Image: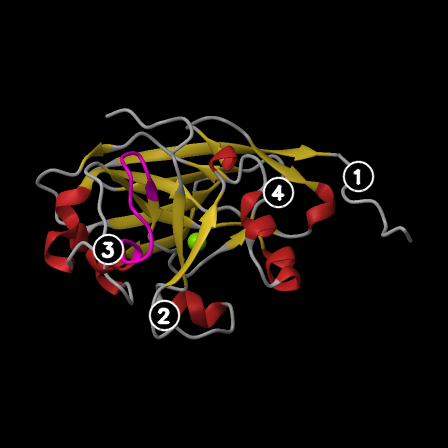
Amino acid sequence: MPLARRPPKILCVGRNYAAHAAELGSEVPSEPLIFLKPPSAVIGDGDPIVVPGWAGRIEHEGEIGIVIGRPARNATVDDAWTHVAGIVPLNDVTARELQRRDGQWSRAKGFDSFCPIGTPVAATGKDPQVLEVVTRVNGVVRQHGRASAMAFPISYLIAYCSTFTTLEEGDVLATGTPEGVGPLVPGDVVEVEIPGVGCLANPVIADNAPGPEPRRKA
Ligand code: MG
């Protein structure tokens, strides 16, 4: 099934696996922690992740992505999956030091190329609770998560998001990353695979732009 090159919006969930929250020194929140990545960050399978040298440590976050088919607002948990058209591997690439420094995550999560998304497959007949996601860097497994280990299941996340925003056709929901996040550096190839669904692979290249200029007085 096709995916819009620029989905209308990309909703993401933070700290949805207890072991990942712990590795970042956090706990699973009492309700889902939702943030957005800009559509301009999306790249496809094979496209390069461009790592700015000034931005510090850059990390992969392999995730199970879902693509909305039928619009949803105030969906119930029981009906949530009927709004899903596709399942897709996604990499929520993150500038970890900027994430900590900024507090708000728009910059750390929103660089151009920081949202590789694969090719979706139809969700029909799939059980979201049995999905798994595996992340490899240069062929070495870094992350292996199971949807059954999520703090908030996928159907709950869809229903939860639909209480504040209309989920539109083509919107993408990134359902959180399991433990094992780690650095990406130029020359790496990072793969995110959802077994039975598909694999997303992206090379990492450097961007030598200087970054923000020092603050100037008015
Ligand atoms: Mg993430």
Residue drawn at 29 percent across, 45 percent down: 167
Real-space CA distance between mark 2 and mark 4, rounded to the nearest whole angstrom: 26 Å
Q: Are marks 2 and 1 in contact (CB under 8 Å)?
A: no
Q: Residues within 10 Å of mark 3 (few under 14, many from 20)?
A: many
Which residue bears the numbered disc 4?
A: 185
Which residue bears the numbered disc 1?
A: 210
Say which label, 2 or 4, has the lower sequence index: 2
Left-right relation of 128 to 139: left
Left-right relation of 41 to 100: left
Instruction: Give the extent of the magenta segment.
Output: 161-172
Q: Provide the secondary structure element on which disc 2 rests.
A: helix
Which residue bears the numbered disc 3?
A: 154
Q: Nearer the viewer, residue 53 or 191?
A: 53
Q: Amino acid at mark 3?
A: Ile
Residue 14: x, y in percent?
A: 42, 60
Q: Amino acid at mark 2?
A: Ala
